[in-house]
Image: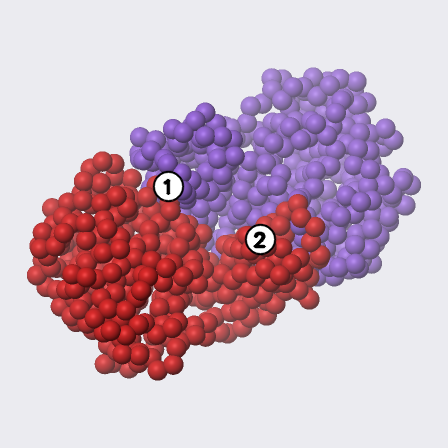
Chain colours: A purple, B red
Amino acid sequence: MSPATKTFFRSRWVSVPDGVEELDPAQLAPGFSAAGVACGLKGGGGTDVGVLASDAPGVRSALALTRNAAAAAPIRVCREQCDASAIRAVAVNSGNANAATGEQGYLDALAMRDAAAEALGIEPRSVAVAETGTIGVPLDIEAVTTGVLEAVEGLSGEGGDRFAAAIMTTDKGPKRCTLRAGGVTVSAQAKGAGMIEPGFATMLCFVQTDGVVDDPEAALRSALAGSMERITVDGQMSTNDTVLLQATGAAGDPLPEGLLDAVLLQLALEIVADGEGATRVGRVEVRGAADADEAERVARAIANSPLVKTALYGRDSNWGRIAQAAGMALAGEQVAELGPDRIQAAELASDSAEAELSIALGRGKASAHVYFSDLTHDYIRINAEYTT
Amino acid sequence: MSPATKTFFRSRWVSVPDGVEELDPAQLAPGFSAAGVACGLKGGGGTDVGVLASDAPGVRSALALTRNAAAAAPIRVCREQCDASAIRAVAVNSGNANAATGEQGYLDALAMRDAAAEALGIEPRSVAVAETGTIGVPLDIEAVTTGVLEAVEGLSGEGGDRFAAAIMTTDKGPKRCTLRAGGVTVSAQAKGAGMIEPGFATMLCFVQTDGVVDDPEAALRSALAGSMERITVDGQMSTNDTVLLQATGAAGDPLPEGLLDAVLLQLALEIVADGEGATRVGRVEVRGAADADEAERVARAIANSPLVKTALYGRDSNWGRIAQAAGMALAGEQVAELGPDRIQAAELASDSAEAELSIALGRGKASAHVYFSDLTHDYIRINAEYTT
């Protein structure tokens, strides 16, 4: 285990349960294996197809999918053709989102899924499919199918790193961990850098454990609410968001309280920190809102304001921009003046990679927080130069 | 009259009534005079205080103000202390927004207004006040008062250009025109480059005419709905937006049909074209929406998407990003696939300064359009370096 792998929990905003040990992230939770291969979707021979599978027929799972109305073909396949509570395996590509690709795209996603199921010798409905990359380009299904078969042959309990690499697009680096606590192991892999805002958030994320999870759907929903649902890079909900939680229960022990939340929050923060062009992460807390909806609306208005995001980049403690964004979200309401006594913005100008901001609206008792990235020259470069 | 002043109506999206003659924009409509002076709010001695006044006691007017709940002091003074239908004059500064400045800010805006009223010898309630610039900094009211008095002494019927300069902040150049048609004259001055999105839009804009306007409030509201209400630079509603229409009626003729709309739309398009860092203007038309709200929501989601805005900058006909933004705005709805047959995005990649995009949702008969700027390196530079 390299020293680098000890640093997974690096945000001050993550509460880590006691007694968590970090393992080599290549090592998957017992009962899981994975692989990543290059099939030619990415230029330059990058790893672009991955398969992750459980050897436990009784694995339990939960699947969270984007709510974007222009959902990609793999999302529709997962919704319509998979048993979300009993997903054994997932096949992924990271070159082509297979979104807005019509009926052929749907058939291609289904073919990709079926190829994995057949090679693994398991029920097609127990295999999920996830794709990320360019929108609106037909999938090279022959290349992908070849890649899927090759990945299935290469499945390994130490394949976590190669799988994490196989799901990356504009990510600067892999996002993954393997942790041990309370007799159970949890491994996880995520990707995401652009088109990041809830829904539950815009990315791919896979979590495996040999721990017992009584209600995977509820556990995942709860952990997402405090993590992937609370981040934004560019305010854009993706067409392809997918989060898969799989639990074999083979360890016989439950997941330690708070561990899933900590893993997903740290991964969410890594996605924000790796937001396209990002150099810093902000956390804005809105207090004293009239109700939860209002708190959420104000927090998102601040987190998505290009003026606040450029102030975070420029290290400018410009609380006026926070007041303006909050005032916009509250248009038409009676609000006490949002002056410096109500707004904490000093950390905008600090040297820290994580800046904490807050605003007290004085209208009620509801609160909400959102994590967000700064808006930088590199965001423009990446997105003005990334072509269809 | 210089050749440059002949080019006011330069957008293909503006319908100009027949027989419109462009005059020197320094020349105000008969019955109006203006001036601009430097009082030291702007560094470098820039013109930063302006006064514009009508000599007609019976001038009729309409005033549109931001809906931002963190409205600046001058907005609250206009709301609470002015007779919006009978505004004779307006005093403006362009260095300090006087927003989030507490009770003192309110008293300062009132003092600025009262100084102008006294110097002009007219009722305080017939004088409006508008301010734009940095948020949250106390106003140097002595400097501003001195500037107001100086401006009143310098009032001139040829002061349109100096007044237009006195309202500029990050604008690359003045936005103004003087036009003659159907026996009446219309002059107008506007500013705006950042914090631009409705409400009615984020800027200062002043329109004067000697034409007869029967219902200035209705005329202004209608013209704004098709112009300032339809633009976005950064999706940010300002704390200080103000539009003032003044009509003396002295010419005895009505404003030609469509002229006010054309003037405000061209000025709105200049604000977008001069959006912070902008190099191009897009117009997105959403057709086939289930209802007007949905059409509006989808159009704004596309116009404010940083991915679409960087594609406009990068000249990338990336229709997938339009599908994604529309799908986000329609999250949870049943939508036919938003593929290339439904999306016109070719002009994203064109050489033209104005790019026209459209999407057909196939859900109903409602439509909406929004004009927007691209998101560029210079937007980041301007906003990361602009300090409080």
Which numbered marker is on residue B69?
Answer: 1
**Relative to A72, is B161 above or below?**
below
Please indicate whether residue B360 sits to the left or right of residue B49 in the image.
right
Q: Quadrant of residue B11?
A: bottom left
Mark 1: amino acid? Ala
Residue drawn at x 25%, y 65% as measured from the top left? B247
Which numbered marker is on residue A287?
Answer: none
Which quarter of the image is occupied by the C terminus of chain A? Answer: bottom right
Q: Mark 2: give few (<14), some (14-19) or many (20+) Cα within 10 Å.
A: some
Mark toward the start of the polypeptide (2 vs 1): 1
Residue A171 visible: no
Please indicate whether residue A360 sits to the left or right of residue A188 in the image.
left
What residue would you read off at disc 2? B294
Residue drawn at x 55%, y 55% as measured from the top left? B292
Q: Chain of mark 1?
A: B
Tag 1, which secondary structure?
loop
Q: Position of residue A79 (x, y in %)?
A: 77, 43
